[in-house]
Image (cartoon, rainbow, N blue to C red):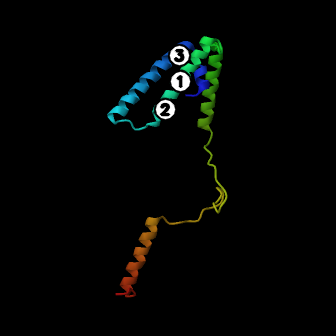
Amino acid sequence: MKAAEVRELGNDELTARLDETREELFNLRFQQATGQLENYGRLGQVRRDIARILSTQRERELGISAEPEPEELERTRRRREREKEEEEEAPKRRRGRRGRGEAAEDEPEADEDSPQEQAEELEADTDAAEEDGDGEE
């Protein structure tokens, strides 16, 4: 969750999100204690999300920032939804890296065999040489 997203939430939504996030942190800590936690990085993310929410609430208490108006919230949500839709519709571009002998995206790459294919070819060559009697014994 980004700070801009947190600031767009109303006070009631912030309180609800804070409760959900604290519950998630509790569950993650419980999983960690029982050895079931798979993603330890998530603990830090959740802690930072809680801090963002608390900071935003404190800013509003002190009058540094105000709760956004309902019309402004609706406009922002619609804009974000449009941006997500455009991202999904746009084709994914691969960024090629050039330099140090690497091929560009538009240049055809040389066909290189995988290590397994190379080993199979070597084995086939060795078998053929033994059948022909060229192998050393």
| Residue at 61%, 42% in the rendered image | 91
Q: Contact (CB < 8 A) between labels 3 and 2? A: no
Relative to 132, 63 lies left or right: right
Q: Is residue 99 above or below residue 42?
A: below
Marks 3/2: CA–CA distance: 22 Å
Residue that appears at 46% across and 18% down: 19
- Residue 84 found in image quarter: top right
Looking at the rendered image, the quarter that the N terminus falls into is top right
- Kind of element beneath mark 1: helix
**Based on the displayed image, in which of its 4 quarters is residue 20 positioned?**
top left
Of pointers 3 and 2, the one earlier in the residue sequence: 3
Mark sitting earlier along the chain (3/1): 3
Q: Quadrant of the C terminus?
A: bottom left
Residue at the spot 62% in from the left edge and 12% down from the top edge = 62
Which of pointers 1 and 2 lies earlier in the amino acid sequence? 2
Q: Mark 2: few, some, or many residues within 10 Å (few <14, many ≥20)?
A: few
Q: Secondary structure at mark 2?
A: helix
Residue 110 drawn above or below residue 129: above
Q: Secondary structure at mark 3?
A: helix
Q: Amino acid at mark 1?
A: Ala
In three-dimensional space, the C-alpha distance between marks 3 and 1, rounded to whole angstroms, equals: 15 Å
How far across and down, in percent of the image, does residue 76 sit? 64, 22
Residue 63 image offset from top left, x and y in percent: 64, 12
- Residue hosting label 2: 44
**Whether residue 9 can be seen here:** no
- Residue 58 at least partly seen: yes
- Name the residue beneath numbered marker 3: 13
Which label is found at residue 63? Answer: none
- Res 51 label: 1
Q: CA distance from mark 1 to mark 2?
A: 11 Å
